[in-house]
Image (cartoon, grey):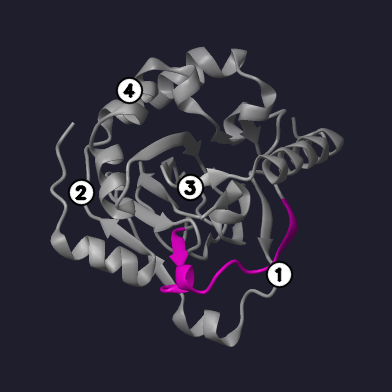
Amino acid sequence: MRVYRLKPLLLSQFEKDGFVCCRRFTSVASISEGIERVIRDVVPGMPSEHVFYEDRAQPDSLKQIQLLQQHDAFFEALAKAGPFRELAETLLRDSVVCKNIQYFNKPPQTGQATPPHQDGYYFKLAPPHALTMWLALDEVDIENGCVRYLPGSHKQGMRSHAATGTLGFSQGIVDFPTDEDRKNEIALIASPGDLLVHHALTVHRADANLSSTRSRRAIGFIFYAAQAKIDSIAWERYQSDLKSDLMRDGKI
């Protein structure tokens, strides 16, 4: 895997805007092969709460795989060491713990919008020092649902969230978009190997995949700073409520 050299301005940009885009961070061939292997060999035996489909009756509507590092040695190695972890430690100015490696897809025409949210709402951390990395495996643009950010929103605290009904993104910001949101939002087009990184409090979203032929696949990494501690009571309550909702709706 190619080693990415952190440009000095990326750290200052991350702290100012709450996100950065690292162009050509890595080649994606081995990661794509790993995902294909997991889908073929591992997903059939995984717990249903770790695998999400737009429609469980249609295997090609697979939209998320959770906790890849717990189910596959290749992704376990990516979680423990290497350029993703090193970049996370640089941007958070702390040692880190990899909490999740996820596969995301928005299948053509069926991939739903990702509601506006802050990842920290799901994480239940104090302080909320964490980040998410999003590695594009396909060409991603306006048509097939690129990620959109609100610069500086990580400095404005946690906004109010409520249930969305969207599988994999169960909570969304209640008052989005405000006039300021509309004015400031930035859409980031990405190519395979480009890495987007955002702070846990950065507001972001993505539109549905409107393409008739193109998928929008990506790998997500979640890193917590060592100083961040989970509110275990809030976390367990959220996970219990989420699982109950998914089971009630027949999603898992």
**Position in image of residue 211 (x %, y %):** 50, 54
Which residue is identified by label 1?
A: 174
When asked about the image quadrant of residue 177, the answer is bottom right
Cα separation between marks 2 and 3: 30 Å
Note whether 19 is above or below 131 in the view shown: below
Quadrant of the snapshot with the N terminus: top left
**Position in image of residue 36 (x %, y %):** 42, 23
Local SS, label 1:
loop
Which residue is identified by label 3?
A: 228
Residue 77's disc number: 4
Q: Which of the two labelled residues, at mark 2 and mark 3, occupies the earlier sequence position?
A: 2
**Position in image of residue 103 (x %, y %):** 48, 35
**Position in image of residue 155 (x %, y %):** 46, 72
Of the two numbered discs 4 and 2 in the rendering, the one whose residue sits closer to the viewer: 4
Along the viewing direction, whichever of 16 and 139 lies nearer the viewer? 16
Local SS, label 2:
loop
Local SS, label 4:
helix
Of the two numbered discs 4 and 3 in the rendering, the one whose residue sits closer to the viewer: 3
Task: Name the residue located 46 percent from the left edge and 65 percent from the top edge.
Answer: 148
Of the two numbered discs 2 and 3 in the rendering, the one whose residue sits closer to the viewer: 3
Quadrant of the snapshot with the C terminus: top right
- Residues drawn in magenta: 146-165
Q: Residues within 10 Å of mark 1 (few under 14, many from 20)?
A: some
Q: Residues within 10 Å of mark 4 (few under 14, many from 20)?
A: few
Residue type for callout 3: Ala
Residue type for callout 1: Val
Along the viewing direction, whichever of 244 and 56 lies nearer the viewer? 244
Residue type for callout 4: Ala
When asked about the image quadrant of residue 235, the answer is top right
Q: Which of the two labelled residues, at mark 4 and mark 2, occupies the earlier sequence position?
A: 2
Say whether marks 3 and 1 touch (CB < 8 Å). Answer: no
Note whether 225 is above or below 177 in the view shown: above
